[in-house]
Amino acid sequence: MRYSTATFLTLLLFSCETVDPLEPDRVIPNQIQPFVDQFIWEAEKRGVDLDVSKLSFEFESGIQGGSAQNSIAGICTRSDNLHLIKIDTLNSLWLLSGDLGHEEIIFHELGHCLLGRFHRDEKFISDDFASIMRTVGLLQYGDLNNFSSLFIVPGDLKAHRRDYYIEELFNENTPSPCWSDPDIISPYPLTFFKESFIEERKYRRMWLDPDDNLWFYGKEKNYLLVGGVFQEQLPGLEIAAMSKDSQDKIWIAGFQEGKILIGTYNSGIFEPKYDSGDFSLVFSGIDQFIVDGSNRLWLGDNFGNLHVWTENEFNLVTGLPEGRVWTMRNGPDNSVYALKGGQLYIFESPQKFIQVGKHNSELPSDFFRSLEVDAQGVAWMQVSGSASYLLQFMPNFEVKRLELHKINLSEIRINSLTTDRNGNMWAATTNGIKKWEGETFSKYCAYNTGVPILSFSSMAIGANGNIWSIGKDTASLQPVLMLSKAGI
Ligand SMILES: [Zn+2]
């Protein structure tokens, strides 16, 4: 999309005025301080020493030097004992920007004032500037929240570029990012898969079996994808969930002719082991089903009840609050972690469990979402309703907060977290798929998907490196199944 309205183009000038007050008052307004802190943190992360002792900010409207078409949003002036940044908070670029846009404007000026950088107006093949140190132009990764609906691409679609631009700010020789040129291969290129699914209700269900074949239920049928070919499987059975036991045996929970069936699957044959008659309670739907490390079967029904196979029938777990079972995951030492009604429960056994929240741990809340447990037994999740940080809940109940803007997930919504066979953590986001690299999530190029942007909602990662994901094509709003890396 081109931005043709020149009025909103904004010049960000660099100049070297000589202002040399003997004892300047150095001020960093509260509104600006978090951005300066973030800049210092970005510098520390890269081993760059900064001298912020001379830094001062002023707000000034109508900064001199601009024109009717190109007003100045900010300016840096450096002298021996003062590094002064003036920001025009009435400038259209500032007014229309959200936090990420403000960060970009301030970081540009800090680039001049603290890093001594000059302007760089070089462009990529994609026509995007190679640096946020460009002289003129709209924001490169920041958002224009307050104006997005009219004609400007919402900032969220550009936020994934932030990691490149910050890197370039501290190192001008940073290699070009994958979104700047279609010939650059992304670390995790995604290839569109031809199939699309229009059944909103069921398209999120997807499983990989121990042989890395993808299973999913859509269009009222079960499909198995082997070598790129969809094969309809187990006609008549509606698979609700699939899990593996400790011997890698596949278990399926589903429905057939109004009855619940739970059984094992091997080489095209489903062998029912239990049915509706094995339950102490009548219900009609299955939300969640897993086999734990001790090969116990756990099932969350559509009334929010939790059933566990013990002593020849599925027994109801009592003492739990109302609310559906959103997620169940195998935890350390054969435990089961579950989110029920948003609350986190850790089950040592069906009888021995605790609810974990702010009353008995360092967790900041009692309600969570997007739970996943990694190979070290660390539970990753977000506070329900809050997207500003990820939580790592350790087996010893210690809690670590990962602020999203510090782990390369800035302004990106996390839809789900998934571990691969090696225990690596992956995030499916509104801006692509990212892998946890130890301190931050990886760079990822959403543009290699062949469409402007896709929102990923769930994924499955095979031992061979295939990443399967179900996403939503934001152009057609249709759910699509994606495959990365190996292709088909
Ligand atoms: Zn400048």
Image (tube, rainbow, N blue to C red):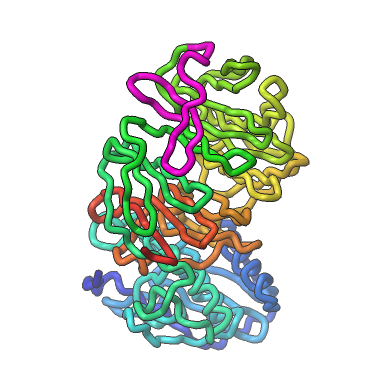
Q: Main secondary structure of the magenta part?
A: strand
User: Quarter of the image holding residue 222?
Assistant: top left
Query: In the displayed structure, would residue 72 be above or below residue 78?
Result: above
| Image location (x, y in percent) of residue 479 | 30, 48
Residue at x 28%, y 35% (from the top left corner): 220
Asked if residue 229 lies left or right of residue 41, the reply is: left
Q: Is residue 245 visible?
A: yes
Quarter of the image with the N terminus in it: bottom left
| Image location (x, y in percent) of residue 254 | 42, 29
Q: Is residue 87 visible?
A: no
| Image location (x, y in percent) of residue 406 | 59, 60
Asked if residue 187 lies left or right of residue 422, the reply is: left
Residue at x 36%, y 31% (from the top left corner): 238
Query: In the displayed structure, would residue 114 be above or below residue 153?
Result: below
Counting the numbered discs, the total is 0
Quarter of the image with the C terminus in it: bottom left
Query: Looking at the image, which is closer to me, 267 or 376?
Result: 267
| Image location (x, y in percent) of residue 54 | 66, 76
Query: Looking at the image, which is closer to me, 383 or 207?
Result: 207
Residue at x 50%, y 60% (from the top left corner): 434
Q: Magenta segment, which residues?
A: 253-281
Is 257 inside the magenta-drawn segment? yes
